[in-house]
Amino acid sequence: MSISVQLKVNGKSVTLDCPSNTTLVDLIRERLELTGTHVGCDTSQCGACTVHLNGRAVKSCTILAAQCEGAQVTTIEGLGDTDNLHPMQEAFRECHGLQCGFCTPGMIMSAVDLVHREPAINEQVIREGLEGNICRCTGYHNIVLAVESAAKKMRN
Amino acid sequence: MVEQSIGKSVLRKEDLRFITGNGRYTGDIDLRGQTYGYFVRSPYAHAVVGEVDTSEAQSMPGVVAVLTGKQVAEDELGGLPCGWMIHSKDGSEMKQPLHPVMAATKVNYAGEPVALVVADSFDEAKNAAEYVSVDYEELPAVVSTAAAQSGPDIYAEAPGNTCYQWELGEKAATDAAIEGAAHVTRYSLTNNRLIPNALEPRAAIADFNRGTEELTLYTTSQNPHLARLILTAFVQIAPEHKLRIIAPDVGGGFGSKIFVYSEETALAWASMKLGVAIKWTAERSESFLADAHGRDHVSEAELAMDEEGNFLALRVKTTANMGAYLSTFASAVPTYLYGTLLAGQYKTPYIYVEVDSVFTNTAPVDAYRGAGRPEATFLVERIVDLAAKELGVDPAELRRKNMIQPADFPYQTPVALEYDIGDYEASLNKALEMADYAGFANRKADSEANGKLRGIGLSCYIEACGLAPSALAGALGAGVGLWESGEVRVNPTGSVTVLTGTHSHGQGHETTFAQLVASRFGISVDDVEVVHGDTGKMDFGLGTYGSRSLSVGGSALSVAADKVVEKGRKIAAHLLEGDVDNIDFEDGEFRLKESNRSKTFQEIAFAAYVPHDYPIEELEPGLAEKAFYDPVNFTYPAGTHICEVEIDPETGVTEITKFTAVDDFGTIINPMIVEGQVHGGVAQGIGQAMFEQCVYDESGQLQTGSFMDYCMPRADDLPNFTVGMTTTVCTHNPVGAKGCGEAGAIGSPPAIINAITDAVGVRDISMPATPEKIWRAIQEQRA
């Protein structure tokens, strides 16, 4: 069965016909060709596919496109670009918070939401808040530093 | 003058694309008209394959073709080879049963591919795969490593499921030393089986062009040239000059993307057969089932000492699980990457090790971060700790007493390696200081006052990296040379393109190698571009594993850069009207001695490509040089890791309160990147020691087949890391580097188990030391 979905992705209005079982991540990657959002598992555990849906971080592999009717979606491409980096993107680079880069877009999207939602950011809050995003490269040490540093900039 | 960048934490050149979603991984690539592949996999660990009926699947919507293992056999494709021949102690060659591209007559592990469905979309391929009907006759499965040799034979040509029975060292002398020793410490251990789980699942696109007969394979590989060589020379998919392999951005490897697997190979074959491009992206459950796993040893060890605690001899018997087939490097891991490291940092005069490698009905087991060296280090550093406890001496002091001293180098171990340089006591001392070892007793008292248990554990590791001197590797059974190639292309304007046969999948080579070359030429890091991962761009290369990229690949670049400077001096001598012996090159300028005349690096580059005033009769135009660097020895990174834990005895939950790693990696180009490698390695070591365990049930079904069942370390499971360095410069490569990628995963597990057993007051807790196991140990201790 095909459905029609209308939503805003990175500020741009999009209307698409897609099979009813299309997930949000398939819509983003396969239909809109925004390949910054990655798929690292099939059980909603790794968080590589994290995007913002109406301002909150969600795992886009677990959301149907049909559930996003009228929604605002932000992906890593919409967070900031090379000439105008979001403080979280900048902090990941400055703190060496990434190695292979595969988990990074999802990690950054989760971290931005965490800073928006948590009144006090400290190491424990960051570690618990990023529990749903797996990174196999960094050991998280520098990711924690990056989020702490970005949180300061985002709040100034 | 441009600031020298070696030793500086230059921010990574590759990051901008990754943080903005502009990375280009294999799964991000789509080709016009591509189809999608989905594999039909065996649900049984061990079964005879009968009729494979594809007719219903063939008629499903969107299906282009269904290809089976039987067709692979009909097309007479070669098997997937193991690149390292090991000889048993009786001189016989290891058993290497055919590792088919897809199974035709028998399946030997759950998840083994038997058919490939090709369809217009991924969903159509996956749906149709459900309709491929395979008749299986299930056979009893061999699963346990320890019991494999007494199980039913999986292969007629490998009686007792034994691949080889290898030995190293002097048996008689070792036996005699143990016989007469004042004290012998004995230890039985299991090194747990792990699943690598790079976050990017394996993926590939095979694209055959019928007009040009060229096959392009985009794939998640740590060594695209090696993959091309194997697919050409052994599997005989396509001629080497018609096969191009591109490994674009790769999302982590940790060894698991070294190997040439069934899926990528089947895809290449199918693309040629069908004349269409086919894309396959593994689902995570496929990664669990069919990526090569790691570790999986069962060992017995005995360490003999005299009255003073001087080590006299070490005797080890290990059974290593190879899984169902010999993967690309598998046979070398529990032998030359393991037995040779059993001397550790110590002057143990006699060592003898026997390794039986066995086949089981489980996924193939091969190199995973550290590969053999974590197994050796775990054994040595646990038994040394147990010895210290038995003798009632400080574990740090027993280690110190037996350490190889700086004056002893070069040091020939009894297990074939010659260590070139190191200062093990320096790392030990620095680690003890950084970990505040002296203050541990007070902290333990504080913990006890709060009803908690506290323990501290050390590990003094060594590894052999920088694989490898080709002649030595060849003598030991390697099927390829292990040099590395590099090319330094100076462009006419003086910017530089660097090509390397190594591959970066998180290690930051695009930055480190740029620093190395930029510093040699006195130019900005921004003016150097590092290119890797495409057999169409660089001549050849052996890829990235065994912490070899900087020590071997970087050395090739260093030699190539020196050649560029030499040619530049000749050009400068002509332009400055001087003798070449009087031309110095420093800070990006060629200067004529005892004159104020000079030419910049950029001016020389321009002159080389616009040779209007040029010694054209003596010198070719252009300024690009290649080098193939073959190391003369391994490199020997070493260091001390110290773990301190606090345990809640009511729950067994363990907190790592401090983890200190002090490492000697030789010359460091970018400290930020090196520290990041240590963090990641230690995190994987903590994963092995406390969280991760691959479990098969008795019938060979994988019980830990998802991130819900296999415990990956997450942010709230890990501590911050305290990282320090000591330095002895590698004596035999021009960079002076030893390699840093694996040290964390090698050094950390024994430190953690030493700390946990110290806290609980028991002899042993097996890895992974989960809260349940720790809680049970505490209860038994109290009973």
Image (cartoon, coloured by chain):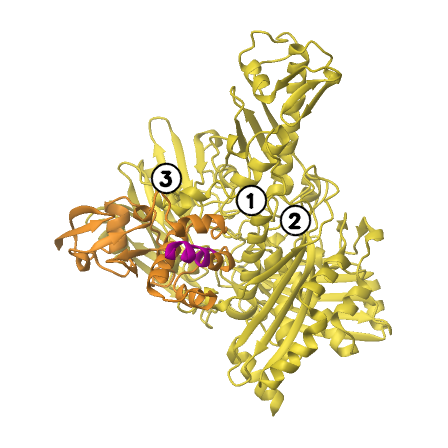
Chain colours: A orange, B yellow
Boundaries of the magenta span: A146-156
Q: Chain of mark 3?
A: A
Dot 1 alpha-carbon crowd within 10 angstroms: few under 14, some 14 to 19, many 20 or more: many
Magenta segment includes B725:
no
Q: Chain of mark 1?
A: B
Q: CA distance from mark 1 to mark 3?
A: 32 Å
User: Tag 3, which secondary structure?
Assistant: loop
User: Tag 1, which secondary structure?
Assistant: loop
Mark number, residue A83: 3
Above or below, comparing residue B779 to residue B715 in the picture? below
Q: Are marks 2 and 1 on the same chain?
A: yes
Judging by the rendered image, the residue that carries numbered circle 2 is B465
Q: Residue at x 39, y 68 (%)?
A: B708
Looking at numbered disc 1 in the image, what kind of residue is underneath it? Thr
Q: CA distance from mark 2 to mark 1?
A: 11 Å
Residue B376 on image: x %, y %:
67, 61
Q: How many marks?
A: 3
Q: Are marks 1 and 3 on the same chain?
A: no
User: Tag 2, which secondary structure?
Assistant: loop
Q: Residue at x 74, y 48 (%)?
A: B728
* A47 or B525: nearer the viewer: B525
* B602 or B500: nearer the viewer: B602
Judging by the rendered image, the residue that carries numbered circle 1 is B544
Q: CA distance from mark 2 to mark 3?
A: 40 Å
Instruction: Kindly indicate whether the residue at mark 1 contacts the one at mark 2 (C-beta within 8 angstroms).
Output: no
Looking at numbered disc 3 in the image, what kind of residue is underneath it? Asp
Above or below, comparing residue B746 to residue A81 in the picture? below
Residue B556 on image: x %, y %:
63, 34
Dot 2 alpha-carbon crowd within 10 angstroms: few under 14, some 14 to 19, many 20 or more: many
User: Can you say which quadrant of the picture contains the C terminus of chain B?
Assistant: bottom right
